Amino acid sequence: MKHLHMYLLLALILALPAGQVLAGEELPIALPKSEGSKRFDMEISVANEKGINLFKSGNFIGAQEFFSKAESLARQFRDPGLGVVSYNLGLTLHQLRLHEEAVEAFNTAKKYARGNRAILNSSLIRFHECGFNPSIPCEKQLPASMHIEGSN
């Protein structure tokens, strides 16, 4: 019964027009504050925070710009926050219905999660994994809005 409830909620979220956010849906994650941060750490953190604020206000295009900047900097400087900012980018791409790109961001997020349970236990990441990889069985059919040619 618990799984049925989760799948119904996920189906409802995916059926919403882009730009609508439900309470209880997965939200972006703030980077942890660390002492003695380097200049690039601050740039990554500021870009991530701006992305979070834009995401929460429903400005997903603006959020995508800041999360992309944060991800690019995190990759460049091999920052430990790469998993978090990639997850945030994936959430934003999902909201924009750019699901193929969201899968890439979510894969990076999982690879660099560093034990972050919000990332590792994300039902949205699992849904994208099974929905776009024919070798991973889905318990629920992929909504038409998330269809990618050749994913079935």
Image (cartoon, helix red, strand yellow):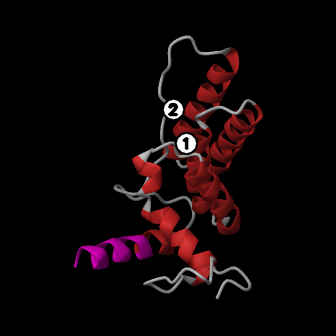
Among the two numbered marks 2 and 1 on one chain, the one whose residue lies closer to the N terminus: 2
Task: List x then y, in percent, for residue 62.
Answer: 66, 43
Closest to the observer, 48 or 133 = 133
In the rendered view, would you say 66 is above or below 22? above
Closest to the observer, 28 or 16 = 28
**Residue shown at 57% from the left, 64% from the top:** 18
Task: List x then y, in percent, for residue 130.
Answer: 54, 76
- Assess whether mark 1 and mark 2 are in contact (beta carbons under 8 angstroms): yes
Kind of residue sitting beneath label 2: Leu
Quarter of the image with the C terminus in it: bottom right
Task: List x then y, in percent, for residue 142.
Answer: 54, 82
Our reading of the magenta stretch's main secondary structure is helix
How far apart are labels 2 and 1 at the CA level? 7 Å
In the rendered view, would you say 142 is above or below 55? below
Callout 1: 10 Å neighbours few (<14), some, many (20+)? many
**Residue shown at 43% from the left, 54% from the top:** 26
- To which residue does mark 2 refer? 31
Task: List x then y, in percent, for residue 19.
Answer: 55, 58
Q: Secondary structure at mark 2?
A: loop
Q: Secondary structure at mark 1?
A: helix
**Residue shown at 73% from the left, 38% from the top:** 75
Q: Which mark is residue 149?
A: none
The image quadrant of residue 43 is top right
**In the image, which residues are magenta?**
1-11
The image quadrant of residue 98 is bottom right
- To which residue does mark 1 refer? 84
53 displayed left or right of 150: left
Res 35 visible: yes
Callout 2: 10 Å neighbours few (<14), some, many (20+)? some
